Image: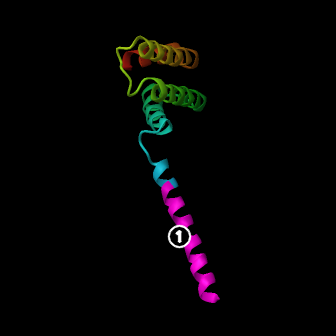
Amino acid sequence: MKKIVTVFVFAITMILGVQTSSAQQLSQDNSRPEVIAKAETAKLTETLDLNGDQSRTIFRALVAKEVGYQKSVQGKDAKSAAVSSEKKKLDDQLSATMKKTLTADQYAEWLKNE
């Protein structure tokens, strides 16, 4: 009876260990919108000397843009009218957020570097 319980506990431990390693692998995926947005936000924070509130707002805007791109733009025909209009809409939303969040000097610098 002890052997059966031991085998059962061992099997459960192995299953939980596999799930944990899978979750860790997903969080390190470089194609995730959060990872892409975090890298871009870090670069912009250094370049434009952003404060904490600006960084958070821009991070959220970049995540929204990346999610939209992955849903509607990436892997689709770039010459398609629907895809190009969706890309323009996402870019315009990002520009509007940047203009609202950044100072005039920061916004001008962002436009230069974009």
Q: Amino acid at mark 1?
A: Met
Q: Position of residue 90 (x, y in %)?
A: 50, 18
Q: Position of residue 97 (x, y in %)?
A: 56, 18
Quarter of the view holding residue 79: top left
Looking at the rendered structure, the secondary structure element under dot 1 is helix
The residue located at (55%, 30%) in the rendering is: 55
The reply, left or right, for residue 19 in relation to residue 84 is right
Using the image as rendered, state which of residue 14 and residue 55 is in the foreground: 14
Q: Looking at the image, is 58 positioned above or below residue 85?
A: below
Residue under pointer 1:
14
The residue located at (43%, 23%) in the rendering is: 73
The question of residue 52 being in magenta is answered with no
Using the image as rendered, state which of residue 33 and residue 82 is in the foreground: 82
The residue located at (45%, 48%) in the rendering is: 28
Q: Looking at the image, is 69 positioned above or below residue 28?
A: above
Colouring scheme applied when the structure was drawn:
rainbow
Span colored in magenta: 1-22
